[in-house]
Image (spheres, grey):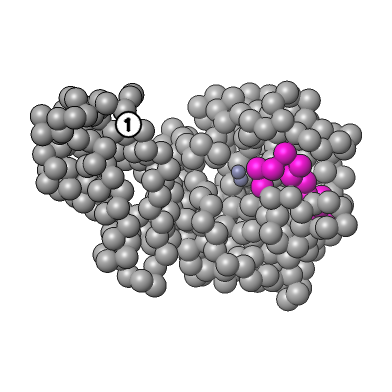
Amino acid sequence: MNIRKAAHDISEYVVGLRRHFHMYPESSLNEFETSKKIRQELDKLGIKYEVVADTGVVARIHGKAEGKTVLLRADMDALEIEEKNTHEYVSKNKGKMHACGHDGHTSMLIGAAKILNETKDSWSGTVVLCFQPAEEIAEGARIMIEKGNVLEGVDGAFGIHLWSDVPVGKVSVEAGPRMAGADFYTLTVRGSSGHASKPDQTIDPIVTASSIVMNLQPIVSREMDPIEPVVITVGTFNAGTRFNIIPDKAVLSGTVRCFSKDIWNDIDKKIERVASNIASAYRASIELDYQKKTPPTINDPDASRRARESVVKILGEEGVYLMERTTGAEDFAYYADSVPSCFAFVGIRNDAKEANFPHHHERFQMDEDALEIGTALYAQYALDFLAEK
Ligand SMILES: [Zn+2]
Ligand SMILES: [Zn+2]
């Protein structure tokens, strides 16, 4: 079966869907109309589905016989951005914009669902279509997995991000860490307040917190393998109300990025150890509110090898693109953490069409020719996965 041709034949349908979703963007966990539209399209295609946590949608297509199960994931939420594009399908929801390409992901997965559903007499196994909310706040994947049980019986998962750093017509599917693990923390340093002229009667949280800031970096430079990139950033440092008062607390907040699951697993404990020991040296104390948001997104070598073969079937060898991993984060990591997975970056960049602004930019655009490629790749990967013993 020529999947590229099948995707080409429905490309107008998929572009139409993408423009519809683009006109009506919705924030994370508020994707009500988006979810309704997805369900309407699945109804038209005769595909049964379940709703997960109000806006998530999961559907299963069964082939002619029992076999393996593969999950295809698309995210559907938009961002709080006022769109500055002027094309005819510009956002109609004020202050909201699909500036990350999730409108494309959802449309491509509906297109792939159509192809897979119409050919289900020719393949064995099960395809799980996972339309996930709330990727931008890194909550949707966990909702789909925990509340929707979408990984039950699943042997492998595949996801796509349309990617503005990759030229249209190219796809990156390398093995290994592809996107960073990303966490957030708030560190409160508690001391004891008093007159700025009598520091001996106080426990100064500003001096303590300053020392903590300076000593978080050696966690990276002295405790980590120098081959492994790790970022610990302090983004805010707030303390005090006026010049002649030593305050009773200082509050730091920041983010951590890394590509190693081992590092991600216990970097919070290292930060806590350093911060609390420094605080006690200054007679102060700390409270660490550490939020593990997403693990690193790591492509399984075998899934990556298969995805490369799928890309070659659709685009030829010249479609394979090599790209450095990125410090952005993706909650697709939660699927990849549970089953062997591949997360593909499908190129949308085309200077001639002004499709060259970064993700989350108010003029973010895509070369819509990429939608046909992404539709084909979802379907091709599923068929290749199910066909392999
Ligand atoms: Zn985004
Ligand atoms: Zn995104």
Q: Is residue 184 visible?
A: no
Please give the name of the residue rendered at 86% of the width and 36% of the height, measured from the top-left corner. Answer: 86
Residue 366 forms part of the magenta stretch: yes
Residue drawn at x 87%, y 37% as measured from the top left: 87
Q: Is residue 28 left or right of residue 120?
A: left
Left or right? Give the position of 57 relative to 142.
right
Q: Main secondary structure of the magenta part?
A: loop
Q: Is residue 363 magenta?
A: yes
Quadrant in which residue 348 is drawn: bottom right
Q: Is residue 322 above or below residue 142?
A: below
- What is the x, y in percent for residue 358? 69, 50
Q: How many marks?
A: 1
Amino acid marked by disc 1: Ala
Q: Residue furthest front?
A: 197
Residue farthest along the bottom direction in this orientation: 317
Crowding at mark 1 (Cα within 10 Å: few <14, some 14-19, many 20+): some
* Along the line of sight, the residue nearer the viewer: 209 or 351: 209
Query: Could you tell me which secondary element the residue under label 1 belongs to?
Result: strand
Judge whether 285 appears above or below 256 on screen.
above
Residue linked to disc 1: 239
Residue in the image at 88% along x and 57% along y: 352
Query: Ligand 1, what quadrant?
Result: top right
Of residue 89 and residue 332, the one placed in the foreground of this image is: 89
Magenta residues span: 359-372
Between residues 62 and 359, which one lies in front from this camera angle? Answer: 359
